[in-house]
Image (cartoon, rainbow, N blue to C red):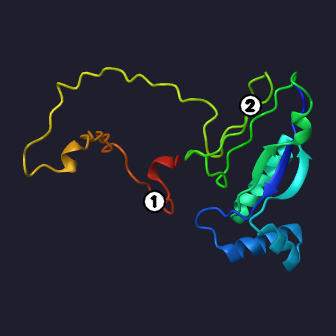
Amino acid sequence: MADVHFDLSFDGTLAPGAEPLAVRQQLAAIFKLDEPGVARLFTGKPVFIKREVDVATAAKFERVFNQAGAILRITPSDAASQQGASHSAPSPTPTASDPDAPESPPTAPAFGSSGLAIAPQGGFLEDPTPVKMPDLDTSYLSLVASPDWTLEDCEPIVATSPVGDLSHLSLVDLDRPNPQDSSD
């Protein structure tokens, strides 16, 4: 499988419900940018954050931007698409900044002919298998219709254990000598 590389760009698009000032402050702290550097990120035009990165690095940057409340755009790098027709380049990942993006969460492209892909964030890796419930016959069950019924009626009856016969036992005072023990 050929190494697939991506370009990471940001055009100032924020996640829904994100506070613009807080996003600017977080990105400035993460990338150690001054005010003009942060302003360049939010011009509305795509700014390349990093070029020619692997899948793991792209996922790491996407996670950092998502935590800050910004939407990072991940596209296949130009070098990967210029390698020729023998290697199929992945299609770009749709993001919220795309006007044609679908409503569903973005999914990563398939890589080469192996069919591998990155699962969407919060998605399942496999489709759940259907569970067939057994057919239980509950026709013999009924509810108690009495108004004076309580949950105490459901408590199991505990049989009392019989107490053994202790009449043949006696207590002996240890301070007095026992008359049976004297053998004069």
Viewport quadrant of the N terminus: top right
Q: Is residue 103 left or right of residue 6?
A: left
Identify whether 98 is placed above or below 11.
Answer: above
Q: Which residue is depicted at the point 82% across and 32% down?
A: 89
Q: Name the outermost residue toward the bottom.
A: 35
> Callout 2: 10 Å neighbours few (<14), some, many (20+)?
some
Where residue 44 appears, as percent x and y from the top left, is: 74, 65
User: Measured along the vertical axis of the image, is residue 164 above or below residue 45?
Assistant: above
- Residue appearing at x 77%, y 62% in the figure: 45
Instruction: Write down the quadrant of residue 124 in the picture.
Output: top right
The residue pinned by badge 1 equals 173
Determine whether 117 is above or below 105 in the image. Answer: above
Residue 38 place in picture, x, y as percent: 82, 73
When asked about the image quadrant of residue 66, the answer is bottom right
The local crowd at label 1, few if under 14, some if 14 to 19, many if 20 or more residues have their Cα within 10 Å, is few
Q: Which mark is residue 94?
A: none
**Residue 112 image point, x, y percent:** 81, 26
Check the image and report above or below for 9 versus 143. below
Residue at mark 2: 110
What residue appears at the point 79 percent right and 59 percent down from the top-left corner? 46
Q: What's the residue type where badge 2 is placed?
A: Ala
* Pick the front one: 100 or 24: 100
Tell us which disc is closer to us: 1 or 2: 2
- For the image, the number of numbered tags is 2
Mark 1 to mark 2 CA distance (whole Å): 91 Å
Q: Earlier in the sequence, mark 1 or mark 2?
A: 2
Instruction: Give coordinates of residue 21: x percent, y percent.
Output: 70, 77
* Towards the viewer: 55 or 177: 55
Marks 1 and 2 in Cβ contact (< 8 Å)? no
Name which residue type carries label 1.
Asp
Q: Look at the numbered disc 1 and give the secondary structure of its residue.
A: loop
Residue 129 shown left or right of residue 55 in the figure: left
